[in-house]
Image: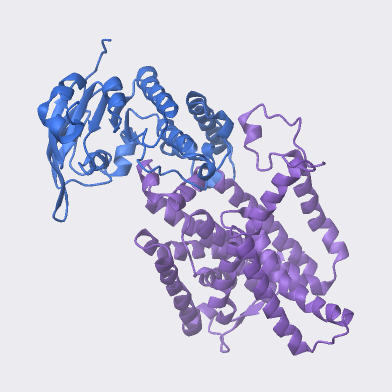
């Protein structure tokens, strides 16, 4: 399978992040090309989630730069990242538990809402029209993820696998150009994993979304990703196509283990 | 059997997004509003208006405001009484200092002033949350108590410290009888409830709820906590301030700062907790529970006592009232921590299937 990649879309240069004396990331550089699926792997505590948090501005690195489509950011914040088209899912699902599935996905449309508070209070023309238009877009996401039957259920009542899917849906509702997925398949059974893989590949394929993915299931990672970064104790120990990473001796000793 | 939505198919998102999506609900709410506007004034005597209906309507409005902040945006406040006071005194000052200013405009300006003060006292919410925020909002309470007691300008240099208004009039409608007052409060409440419902089902309401449920995720999605929290404080204080203006002008007619003490703040907070956090309907249930129940107990206890051949003294009645009221609050909170509104919606769910179990 040959895949076409575009320009460099996201480039991290010499990023270091520390919490007091604990060094979470040390001098890490890697890049992401448009339309590719880029995986980040590594043992627990390697700094994978911190990496995603740096990319979308939840954490501020002490050193290093993030270059997004040629634009330099030394101080990213979540709002800027969202405006720049980065959306993400969370490792331990961070859905809005008291709201229905539809409302959760509708919050993903928040940045595209133009009507003001007064218009919304009076359900005035623009606010109403906008609400309907965004609802239609959200329904497309619902169809895509095959969650029509639960659209009005409060997410707190859903089983784990479906919550993960709604979490992905909320990120998709933002129509992101870069999608960060933090362990989208953790805790899932084989069928749910297969579904999730299908959704990730379809998103990448149909919408051309660039995907940065953290995952522990090596079968999945090696199968669907185009390039893989390996972290260990906050350092980068490997980077390249899955086959190259699989045979890298440093990666094998730190994470993959020798095959018996 | 009557409460069925069989055959009510939604063919557009507009139909699906109505406030009352089920036809029976629409008819019921219309019937209730018509009854409240036409039927109640014909049936009810003056005492009931003064003692129950008018306080119920005004406190419902205030509870609605508190629910926006506490129930929808998740910011606990103990300053509701203060914002009521700001609304009342600001409306009073607009009313007496600007000649010929329409009464409704005074009320709304009172609400706007309360909104501005609400934003100022909402600033700590950007840093602290939960119980700590509740304590921070208490500052508003003590501050307004002090200001309206000590700064004579706000009370127009009244020597007694209390202010009074008379001859309320909207266009040519003179608001004198309790029925007039009731209709004024009812109209304002219906309009404000509609506004609140619209906001909570729109983008701004989703921002508030997102901040309440998971603030980190909300930020990542592009919701600015500053705007979401302060707008909740502003809208909430606007509602509460308008309710305060009504409480002063329409219910009390003459008042002093003690009318808006910290007791009132607690009362409003209890209303939304018992009624149901994050529910417009819950605000009404909570206000009804706290306003009507004590009076109802007061009226019915002697009657119940006489059935069993016990005569209860007046003091005994007022003690028993407190005991039963407290017990009922505990019972409700254990039985349904999400408030009466949740009981109501569970009941409706069951009714949809009745008489079948599934």
Residue with the most extreme front position: A260
Q: Vertical placement of A93 versus B96: above or below?
A: above
Q: How many marks?
A: 0
Q: Position of residue B101 (x, y in %)?
A: 61, 64
In the image, A63: left or right of B22? left
x 53%, y 30%: residue? A147
The chain letter corresponding to purple is: B
State which quarter of the image contains the N terminus of chain A: top left
Residue at the location (38% across, 40% down)? B221
> Which residue is at 30% across, 34% downward?
A84
For the point 89% across and 79% down, which residue is it?
B307
Q: Nearer the viewer, residue A185 or B159?
A: A185
User: Which chain is assigned blue?
Assistant: A
Query: Residue A196's image quarter?
Result: top left
Q: Is residue B60 visible?
A: no
The answer to whether residue B126 is visible is yes
Q: Residue B254 location, x and y as percent? A: 65, 79
Split into 4 quadrants, where in the image is the C terminus of chain A? top left
Q: Nearer the viewer, residue B206 or A167?
A: A167
Foreground pick, A96 / B242: A96
- Direction from residue B229 to residue B98 in the image, left or right: right
In the displayed structure image, the side of residue B65 where residue B36 appears, left or right = right
From the top left corner, tell me how far across and down residue A158 is, in percent. 52, 40
Q: Quadrant of residue B171?
A: bottom right
- Whole-percent x and y of residue A168? 41, 33
């Amino acid at each position: 399978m040959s895949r076409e990649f575009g320009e460099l879309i996201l480039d991290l240069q010499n990023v270091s992040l520390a919490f007091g004396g604990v060094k979470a990331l040390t001098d890490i550089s890697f890049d992401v090309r448009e339309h590719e699926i880029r995986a980040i792997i590594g043992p627990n505590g390697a700094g994978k989630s911190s990496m995603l948090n740096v990319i979308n501005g939840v954490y501020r690195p002490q050193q290093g730069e993030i270059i997004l489509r040629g634009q330099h950011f030394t101080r990213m914040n979540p709002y800027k990242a969202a405006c720049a088209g980065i959306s993400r899912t969370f490792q331990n699902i961070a859905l809005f538990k008291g709201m229905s599935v539809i409302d959760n996905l509708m919050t993903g449309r928040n940045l595209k809402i133009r009507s003001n508070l007064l218009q919304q209070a009076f359900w005035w023309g623009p606010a109403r029209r906008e609400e309907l238009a965004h609802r239609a877009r959200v329904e497309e996401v619902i169809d895509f993820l095959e969650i029509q039957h639960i659209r009005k259920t409060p997410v707190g009542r859903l089983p784990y696998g479906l919550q993960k899917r709604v979490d992905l849906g909320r990120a998709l509702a933002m129509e992101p150009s870069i999608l960060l997925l933090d362990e989208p398949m953790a805790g899932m059974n084989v069928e749910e994993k297969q579904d999730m893989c299908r959704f990730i590949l379809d998103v990448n394929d149909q919408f051309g979304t660039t995907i940065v993915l953290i995952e522990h299931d090596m079968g999945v990672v090696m199968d669907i990703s185009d390039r893989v970064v390996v972290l260990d104790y906050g350092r980068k120990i490997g980077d390249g196509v899955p086959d190259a990473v699989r045979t890298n001796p440093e990666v094998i000793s730190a994470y993959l283990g020798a095959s018996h | 059997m009557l409460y069925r939505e069989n055959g009510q198919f939604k063919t557009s998102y507009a139909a699906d997004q109505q406030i009352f999506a089920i036809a029976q609900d629409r008819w019921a709410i219309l019937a209730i509003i018509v009854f409240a506007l036409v039927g109640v004034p014909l049936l009810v005597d003056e005492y009931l208006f003064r003692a129950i209906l008018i306080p119920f309507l005004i406190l419902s409005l205030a509870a609605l405001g508190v629910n926006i902040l506490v129930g929808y945006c998740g910011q606990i406040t103990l300053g509701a009484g203060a914002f009521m006071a700001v609304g009342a005194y600001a409306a009073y000052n607009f009313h007496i200092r600007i000649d010929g200013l329409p009464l409704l405009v005074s009320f709304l300006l009172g609400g706007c002033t309360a909104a501005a003060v609400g934003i100022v006292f909402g600033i700590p919410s950007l840093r602290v949350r939960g119980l700590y925020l509740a304590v921070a909002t208490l500052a508003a309470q003590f501050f307004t108590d002090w200001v309206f007691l000590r700064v004579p300008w706000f009370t127009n240099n009244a020597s007694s410290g209390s202010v009074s208004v008379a001859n309320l009039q909207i266009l040519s409608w003179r608001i004198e009888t309790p029925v007039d007052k009731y209709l004024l409060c009812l109209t304002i409440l219906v309009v404000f409830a509609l506004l609140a419902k619209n906001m909570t089902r729109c983008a701004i309401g989703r921002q508030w709820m997102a901040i309440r449920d998971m603030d980190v995720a909300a930020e990542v999605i592009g919701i600015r906590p500053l705007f979401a929290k302060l707008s909740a404080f502003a809208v909430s204080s606007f509602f509460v301030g308008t309710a305060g203006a009504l409480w002063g002008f329409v219910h009390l007619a003459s008042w002093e700062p003690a009318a808006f003490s910290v007791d009132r703040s607690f009362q409003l907070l209890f209303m939304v907790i018992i009624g149901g956090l994050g529910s417009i309907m819950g605000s009404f249930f909570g206000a009804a529970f706290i306003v009507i129940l004590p009076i109802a107990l007061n009226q019915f206890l002697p009657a119940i006592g006489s059935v069993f051949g016990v005569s209860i003294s007046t003091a005994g009645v007022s003690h028993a009232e407190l005991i039963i009221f407290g017990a009922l609050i505990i019972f409700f909170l254990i039985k349904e921590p999400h408030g009466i509104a949740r009981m109501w919606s569970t009941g409706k769910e069951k009714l949809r299937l009745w008489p079948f179990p599934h």
